[in-house]
Amino acid sequence: MANGGGRHWNEETQRWEDGVRDVARATPPPPARPGHAPAPPPGEVRDPDAPAGAWPVAAPPAPPAVPGGHSRRTVWAVIGASAAVGVAVALVVTFGPGGKGHGDDRGAATASGTPATTEPPPTTYAPPEPDTETPSPSSSADEPPAGYTAYDDPEGFRIAVPDGWQHQRSTVSSQYGMDIVNYRDSTGRHRLQVYEVQESSPDESFDQYLSADVPKPRGFRTLSRVNLDSGDFTGSRLEYLADSLRGEPDIGTWHVVDERFRAADGRLYALASYGPESDGRDDEQEVLSAALDWFCPSSATCAH
């Protein structure tokens, strides 16, 4: 009789083929796979001879192992008839090539006789133990870094300075905007300066400072100049060394990091951190970063 155009086993070519074939009504099943074929890796694999979307082949369960080969059309299912008497019944289920069975599913039945399903069992996760040492995301949101104090300056801004520096605060009159504010440590060797910038942009302000028209400290030499413009932020940073600074103690070479930027109130400000080059450059960067993170004009609304 003529079979349909589905996938079928060709006895002459000994392979699966697509298309119309003439077969007898009682066609024997295709030959079994070799008895010593290597077991597929764990997890479900797909039969390379099967049409797309069909014939899933599950990995062999262990233990018990099923001896011998397994055809693509026969499923050996072991059903335990009774746990008390220890009787096992082997059930052979044969599917036609167009059937909707489990194909070569080696796990078609469990020892208790309950049919196995192709869906994996749900995965259970144990809840992680709380880490008492990790602070919550908001625990430090309203606090400056350890060792720093948030300070509301009378000149009209808030800033974070190292603990105690606010008590060494001093001001100098400025020809533009607010007074120049200085915060110092108890030794006078470290200083944070805040003032308002007159130029129209941070880059213009540094261009003017670095021009030949403006006198520089003795031994002045530039380390770096970086434009920090990004999105809504406008700013530039200048890092330099100087052998001495007018009105400051003689400590050897000074290291200075000066950043000029547009704040939340639309005005331009400068924050400059000073310290001795002899103790490294990280401390000036740290002081400046904390001050910038917490700087906010009194008339504006900021994150901190």
Image (spheres, rainbow, N blue to C red):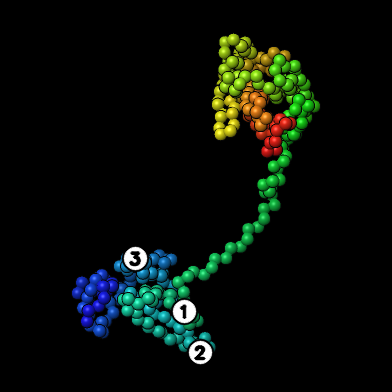
Q: Given the image, on which type of amino acid does mark 1 rest?
A: Pro
Q: Residue at x 35, y 81 (%)?
A: 94
Q: Quadrant of residue 4?
A: bottom left
Q: Is residue 261 visible?
A: yes
Kindly report which numbered mark, 2 or 1, lies closer to the viewer in this rendering: 1
Q: Quadrant of residue 33?
A: bottom left
Q: Is residue 71 visible?
A: no
The answer for how far apart the CA atoms under marks 2 and 1 are is 21 Å
In the image, 153 versus 67, the foreground residue is 153
Residue 170 on image: x %, y %: 77, 21
Residue 100 on image: x %, y %: 37, 76
In the image, 169 versus 262, the foreground residue is 262
The answer for how far apart the CA atoms under marks 3 and 1 are is 25 Å
In the picture, the quarter occupied by the N terminus is bottom left
Name the residue tied to disc 2: 85
Residue lying farthest left? 12
Q: Given the image, on which type of amino acid does mark 2 rest?
A: Val
The answer for how far apart the CA atoms under marks 2 and 3 are is 44 Å
241 sits left or right of 79 in the view: right
Name the residue tied to disc 3: 52
Label 2 sits on a secondary structure element that is loop
Name the residue tied to disc 1: 115
- The answer to whether 215 is drawn above or below residue 147 in the figure is above
